[in-house]
Image: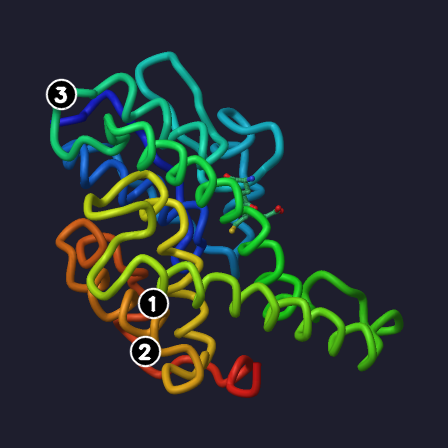
């Protein structure tokens, strides 16, 4: 049980989802979970600012210790609860190197995804350009081809850094889940589709699935042509 932990989070936020998967994998269920509404701007509430001066989620506290950045929280949990739950950093130097490589490439992947799906949220109405959105879509397509190739080279049924589930999967899966929620074609990206189908059945991922995706199973088709 993890009653001395608090996570402030929003449904469908990939950074929040990373921390939730890590908490599940480390068997830290029972933490104080506070689901906030983006629509009601609850991530800009005093409750969040008390923990996170950026007014963002995830906002995470363990006792008096605050670790808000999703990657930092995942590393922290693995390092503090090394021998509890799933071991998320492999011993083999090959797998470890690949895990770090994919984790940090995962940040680029996430940025390229959000540049497309949140274009209208990020760019004020008068400043939007079809040509800019197309450029972001092309950049995302190139990125997707890279990840499709990585998974192809790993072979069927593999995780991102090898046979074991690692921090790379913890931090990158939410990006991949979001891609498919926004209409990515499994036909066009079969390896990503296979990885998504495999991991979405994992108990930590199922347990932390965005609640509003469960309520409304139909996603968007923003990425159908990417
Ligand atoms: N680098 C941060 C990013 C956190 C983040 O961007 N959170 C978003 C939700 S997905 C948020 O709270 N956005 C509201 C805002 O920035 O005002 C992390 O990885 O934890």
Q: Tell me, yes or no, whether the two marked residues, 1 and 3, touch with CB atoms within 8 Å.
A: no
Q: Which residue is denoted by mark 1 in the rendering? A: 212
Above or below, 202 relative to 164: below
Q: Tell me, yes or no, whether the two marked residues, 2 and 3, touch with CB atoms within 8 Å.
A: no
Circle 3: is it few (<14), some (14-19), or many (20+) Cα within 10 Å? few
The residues tagged by marks 1 and 3 sit, at their Cα atoms, a distance apart of 33 Å
Q: Quadrant of residue 45?
A: top right
Q: Give the x, y percent position of residue 179.
A: 45, 70
Q: Give the x, y percent position of residue 71.
A: 45, 34
Q: Quadrant of residue 84?
A: top left
Q: Which residue is denoted by mark 2 in the rendering? A: 216
Confirm or reject: label 2 Cβ below 8 Å from ligand 1. no
- For the C terminus, the quadrant is bottom right
As helix, strand or loop, the secondary structure at mark 3 comes to loop
Question: Which residue is at the far top?
Answer: 64
Numbered disc in front, either 1 or 3: 3
> Which residue is at a point 22% across and 63% down the rendered structure image?
200
Q: Which residue is denoted by mark 3 in the rendering? A: 83
Q: Give the x, y percent position of residue 124.
A: 80, 66
Q: Tell me, yes or no, whether the two marked residues, 1 and 2, touch with CB atoms within 8 Å.
A: yes
Indicate which quadrant contains ligand 1.
top right
Camera-side residue of 196 and 126? 196
> Which residue is at a point 47% across and 32% down the rendered structure image?
47
Above or below, 220 relative to 50: below
First in residue order: circle 1 vs circle 3: 3
């Amino acid at each position: 049980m993890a009653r001395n932990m608090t996570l402030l989070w929003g449904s469908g936020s990939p950074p929040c989802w990373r921390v939730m998967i890590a908490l599940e994998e480390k068997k830290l269920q029972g933490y104080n979970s506070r689901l906030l509404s983006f629509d009601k701007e609850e991530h800009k509430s005093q409750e969040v600012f008390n923990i996170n001066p950026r007014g963002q989620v995830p906002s995470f506290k363990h006792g008096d210790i605050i670790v808000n950045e999703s990657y930092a929280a995942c590393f922290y949990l693995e390092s503090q609860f090394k021998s509890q739950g799933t071991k998320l950093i492999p011993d083999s130097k090959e797998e470890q190197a690949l895990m770090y490589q994919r984790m940090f490439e995962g940040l680029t992947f996430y940025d390229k995804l959000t540049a497309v799906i949140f274009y209208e949220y990020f760019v004020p109405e008068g400043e939007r350009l079809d040509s800019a959105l197309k450029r972001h879509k092309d950049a995302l397509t190139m990125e997707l081809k890279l990840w499709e190739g990585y998974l192809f080279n790993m072979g069927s049924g593999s995780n991102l850094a090898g046979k074991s589930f690692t921090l790379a999967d913890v931090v990158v899966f939410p990006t991949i889940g979001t891609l498919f929620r926004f209409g990515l074609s499994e036909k066009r990206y079969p390896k990503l589709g296979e990885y998504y189908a495999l991991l979405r059945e994992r108990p930590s991922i199922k347990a932390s699935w965005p609640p509003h995706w469960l309520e409304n199973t139909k996603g968007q088709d923003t990425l159908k042509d990417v």
